[in-house]
Amino acid sequence: MPTPSSPVWLFDLDNTLHDASHAIFPAISANMNVYIARVLGDGVTPASIEAVNAARLGYWKRYGATLLGMIRHHQVDAADFLRETHDLHALHEMVRWERGLSRLLKRLPGRKILLTNAPTAYSKEVMRHIGLQRHFSHHIAIEDMHVHRQLRPKPSTLMLRRLLRKHRLNPRRCVLVEDTLVNLKHAKRLKLRTAWVTQYLRYSDPSGKAPLPKMLKRPAYVDVKVKSVLQLPSHLRRLRAAS
């Protein structure tokens, strides 16, 4: 049973609890390219791949998510975008994860909350396939990340503040477990503890063009760097001491 001093774990999903880079992200990326090409096209001819990549990367850098740029500049419907880009007919064949995740979550002290920028239908299907849903008290997907009627996915500090208030969480007790550094950086500004998971990282941009640097050093705003979430129990003391 969680105690008042137990941590509250905010787990990301893709490339944290499973290897999305293996097959899922390439499939989503291909769907996204088709969708964006259609939106940026002239109604007859889709936009070029160069225009699509420029828009994806530009909106990702400016807003933290390509979807936010598509909403702001092209009046795209978020639900339609998420449904089409995450339409994966053989998802069960694409998911790869480590053995022992369920045992880890069971023995890890404290409450667990899933906090993912992925849509609800997709993230629930992945969690069901891996068999982890029973370990989480809440499942927070991108559809739940509205603040003042505006979509505010990670790394939004506005969204994180609202989440903390809604669930009556002390930020200093919370640990965000993530593969994405910008999300960890914003969480640290709110005094959350941060754990960076690196084993599934392969690219440094959303279109899968720029490889990661060979040396991934731990930034100052990251309290713990682990290759796998299975290593978290051995870092509990350091996470508890982090400020």
Image (cartoon, rainbow, N blue to C red):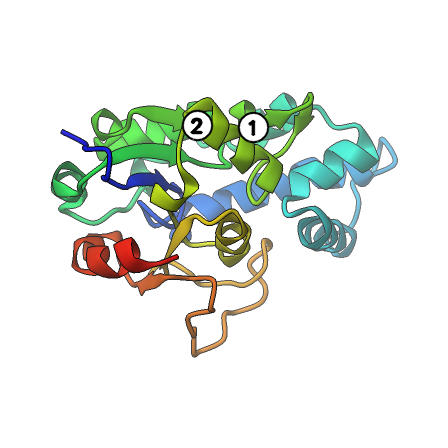
Q: Residue at x 56, y 28 (%)?
A: 145
Q: Is residue 140 above or below residue 178?
A: above
Q: Nearer the viewer, residue 8 or 168?
A: 168
Q: Residue at x 21, y 55 (%)?
A: 236
Position of residue 57 relative to residue 100, above or below, is below
In the picture, measured across the screen, residue 181 lies left or right of residue 68, that is left
Q: Which residue is mark 1?
A: 145
Residue 36 percent location from the top left of the image: 71, 39
Q: Is residue 66 left or right of residue 9?
A: right
Residue 73's label in the rendered image is none
Amino acid type shown at disc 1: Met
Relative placement, left or right, of 63 versus 228 is right
Q: Nearer the viewer, residue 104 or 49?
A: 104
Q: Is residue 120 left or right of residue 154?
A: left
Question: Residue beneath label 2, please?
Answer: 140
What type is the residue that disc 2 sits on? Ile
Please report the residue visible at 31 percent of the width from the left and 41 percent of the height from the top. Answer: 95
- How crowded pointer 2 is (Cα within 10 Å; few <14, some 14-19, many 20+) is rated as many
Q: Position of residue 9 (x, y in %)?
A: 32, 40
Sequence-first tag of 1 and 2: 2
- Give yes or no for contact between labels 1 and 2 (Cβ–Cβ under 8 Å): yes
| Neighbourhood count class around disc 1 (C-alpha, 10 Å): few under 14, some 14–19, many 20 upward | many
Which is more toward the observer, 34 or 66?
66
Q: Is residue 87 visible?
A: no
Quadrant of the drawing holding the N terminus: top left
Look at 79% across and 34% down and name the residue there: 72
